[in-house]
Image: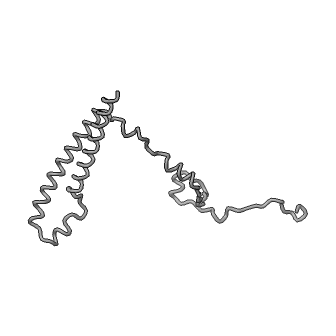
Amino acid sequence: MMVLGQEPRQTTSNLGHLQKPSVQALIHGLNRHYYSISINYRKNELEQKMLLNLHKKSWMDGLTLSDYKEHCVINETTVTDMLELAKNYNKALEDEEKMTPEQLAIKNVGKQDPKRHLEEKVDILMANNIVQSLGAMLDTMVF
């Protein structure tokens, strides 16, 4: 091999992947040239299972109580939001009685539906309060 003037190892080139930087790339500190090579990682079943369990909650997380002051503040803000949503829903019902079917079809385009948001707030408030009260009862009975 040395007789032909070539090295015995294989050489590769990166010219196919070399790209000129854009103005935005230069602003962000990427100097003259940079690579854009897509890398695909294959994970086996065990690695996928490990990654899925990475931020999984344990059974004890449901029993931890939030601070009562924070819980009270969250309850107050949720109830005031619910009051506003109830007023908006009531006003929307009154407006719907006066509208034609064509106007009803385009009335809520681009606006939030107060009924759906009110239902979501009620569900969240009830779930948080039930979890908090059951956790408090369990703590008083067990400890």
Residue at 51% x, 53% y: name it: 27
In the displayed structure image, the side of residue 34 where residue 8 appears, left or right: right
Above-or-below relation of 88 to 66: below
Above-or-below relation of 128 to 86: above
Tell me the quarter of the picture where residue 17 sits. Answer: bottom right
In the displayed structure image, the side of residue 134 where residue 2 appears, left or right: right
Quarter containing the N terminus: bottom right
Quarter containing the C terminus: top left
* Nearest to the observer: residue 59 or residue 70: 59
* Nearest to the observer: residue 60 or residue 77: 60
Residue 141 position, x and y percent, is: 31, 30
* Nearest to the observer: residue 126 or residue 84: 126
Furthest residue in direction bottom, as rendered = 102
In the displayed structure image, the side of residue 80 where residue 40 appears, left or right: right
Residue 98 position, x and y percent, is: 8, 66
Residue at 23% x, 56% y: name it: 116
